[in-house]
Image: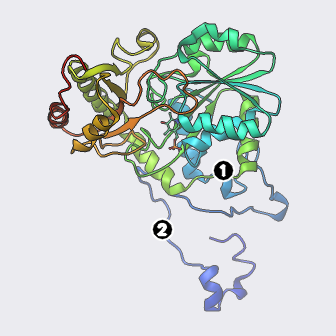
Amino acid sequence: MPIYAEARDNLLSNWKTKLIHSQANVPQGFRSLVTPVFRGSTTLFERAADAVDHWDHDESPYSYGLYGTPTALELAARIAELEHGKKTFLTPGGQSAISLINLALLKAGDHVLLPESVYGPNANFAAEMLGKFGVDVQTYTPTVGEGISADLRANTRLIWCESPGSVTMEVQDVRAIAEVAHRAGALVVLDNTYSAGVYFDAFAHGVDVSMQALTKYIGGHSDLLLGSVTTNDHAVYKSLGAASQQLGLTVSPDDCALALRGMQTLAVRLAAIQSAAIRIAKWIAARPEVEIVLHPALPSCPGHDLWLRDFTGSTGVFSFVLKKRYRRQDVVDFIDRLRLFPVGYSWGGVTSLAVPWTAGAHRPNWAYGERLIRLHIGLEEIDDLLADLTRSFEALPAYGPGA
Ligand SMILES: *Cc1c(COP(=O)(O)O)cnc(C)c1O
């Protein structure tokens, strides 16, 4: 095994040294269906003269575990393949994918645009970190489409999109935004977590960088945190790689192995989750207690026509809003009565979830008061989920028609 074993044979007899430099052998030629979990911080070079430290595996061989073992590179390559991208970087979570993109592509004096419907921690990173480093941050109306041109400035470098948006689910005209951005020399970044990278083809719609929280559908079982950043642009690739090295972002090969396993069942999980979520969303929309259901496949969702035009499917996270007569206490009681919907953040796993939502600071135009409930639909029997929801709807207080 060790390349230097021959030369140092006489040094290998002491048992303590053997513990470190063993000459034990195992049969070669094991083949399985599973990507091996390669762990390793140090990776070895043939000769001293070969030692280099470079993140880019296209330019140099494996040089340090920080830049990924073959397990991570396999997952990255499969995400790139799935999203029709050229290159993917993995990050410790979706949020670090967001911060990597911002730190790699923005500098002091740049202007960045984020939709009001953007994932909350993305807005917080922009307001606090980017603000601290001299980047000008502005939010925009997610449904603005080509009207985004009014928000562009000479120094606009990046336009974030998230479609559908977090919690309020606005579907964006990503193609129109990308056309405006590219005319002005700006880049478009999409948080493509909702579509699992498959129900919306980011690069076919003009996106320059697509990121996902692999934590959600790729992992699919609520047992790992990972993010991905995918691009087709060589200059962006180089900036992301350098920033990833400088920030020291790395991922666990064990988590990557779980994500690789999750990917194998992505198609069947998404199909089951999609049809269950649509059925439940339509059922909720017919309840007299409900003001609106925010699910992209329902006409009530802002941007539903764009979803029809641009998406090939929908997934399991959506929201609904109780009528104005209900109060915050009714909302939390409604959720606490549910037995098959534990309360928790994140989504994309096999367990249905429910969580109440109110406006963050980046959402001045939030229209739903304290009456919004976000659901994630998992893989339980649909009739059981409906029975659970029925019980909780029926236990809401009757305020009378005037209330
Ligand atoms: C969950 C989520 C993230 C962040 O992912 P983590 O892995 O939890 O850090 C980013 N964007 C969206 C849309 C998400 O739902």
Residue 52 lies, in percent from the top left, at 81, 55
- Above or below: residue 242 compared with residue 196: below
Residue at 42% x, 40% y is 263
In the image as oriented, which residue stretches furthest toward the right?
A: 49
Q: Amino acid at mark 1?
A: Leu
Circle 2 sits in a helix, a strand or a loop, which is it? loop
Residue at 42% x, 38% y is 217
Nearer to me, 46 or 28: 46
Query: What is the quadrant of residue 50 in the picture?
Result: bottom right
Residue 113 lies, in percent from the top left, at 67, 23
Quarter of the figure with the C terminus: top left
Nearer to me, 350 or 106: 106
Nearer to me, 87 or 208: 208
In the image as oriented, which residue stretches furthest toward the front?
A: 402
Q: Is residue 174 visible?
A: yes
Residue at mark 1: 249
Residue 56 lies, in percent from the top left, at 73, 44
Q: In 3D space, how far apart are the residues under numbered discs 1 and 2 (Cα atoms)?
A: 35 Å
Residue at mark 2: 27
Quarter of the figure with the N terminus: bottom right
Q: Is residue 89 visible?
A: no
Count numbered badges in the picture: 2
- Above or below: residue 341 compared with residue 154: below
Q: Is residue 225 left or right of residue 249?
A: left
Q: Is residue 289 left or right of residue 86?
A: left
Q: Which mark is residue 130?
A: none
